[in-house]
């Protein structure tokens, strides 16, 4: 027993879109690297106001609170800009849409 088939030709828009998660992940990694560099560049002398010495691990943690969200946002902005520029290069193609219905 043969299955009824229907063919239909339609137009579709094809465009390349960046993966936002990848760009945001790279931004987070860059934020972690920036926090590490800033921690290494800091001096760990007693604070004049409190007379306390902050350990490098604590400084790194505090810097992560600022650099990771900034890197995440920067990665998202870069992905948005690339998505907007990719929209200019849209292509319209003709595709054949085929539906196969199996008879019982």
Image (cartoon, grey):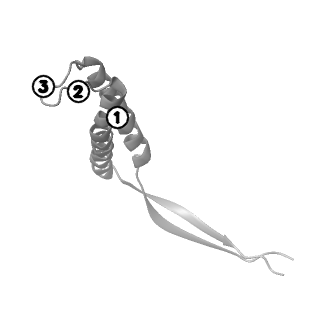
Q: Nearer the viewer, residue 52 or 4?
A: 52
What secondary structure is found at the residue carrying circle 2?
Answer: loop
Judged left or right of residue 95, residue 27 is left
Provide the residue designation for mark 2.
52
Question: Which badge, 1 or 3, comes first in the chain's sequence?
Answer: 3
On residue 7, the disc is none
Q: Provide the secondary structure element on which disc 3 rests.
A: loop
Q: CA distance from mark 3 to mark 2?
A: 8 Å
The secondary element bearing badge 1 is classed as helix
Image quadrant occupied by the N terminus: bottom right
Foreground residue among 73 and 23: 73
Question: Where does label 3 land, which residue?
Answer: 48
**Mark 3 closeness class: few <14, some 14–19, many ≥20 residues within 10 Å:** few
Task: Relative to 51, say whether 72 is above or below.
Answer: below
Toward which corner of the image does residue 45 lie, by quadrant?
top left
Circle 1 residue: 61
- Quadrant position of residue 31: top left
**Residue found at x 28% / y 27%:** 54
Q: Which callout, 1 or 3, points to the residue nearer the camera?
A: 3
Task: Depth check: give the residue in front, 62 or 75.
Answer: 62
Task: Point out residue 97 in the picture as x, y percentages from the top left corner.
Answer: 58, 67
Q: Which quadrant, please, contains the C terminus? A: bottom right
**Is residue 27 at all visible to an observer of this figure?**
yes
């Amino acid at each position: 027993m043969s299955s009824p088939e229907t063919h239909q030709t339609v137009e579709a828009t094809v465009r390349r879109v960046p993966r936002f998660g990848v760009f945001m992940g790279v931004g987070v990694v860059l934020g972690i690297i920036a926090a590490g560099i800033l921690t290494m560049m800091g001096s760990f002398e007693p604070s004049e106001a409190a007379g306390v010495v902050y350990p490098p691990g604590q400084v790194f943690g505090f810097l992560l609170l600022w650099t990771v969200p900034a890197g995440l946002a920067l990665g998202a902005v870069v992905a948005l800009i690339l998505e907007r520029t990719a929209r200019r290069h849209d292509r319209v193609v003709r595709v054949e849409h085929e539906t196969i219905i199996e008879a019982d």
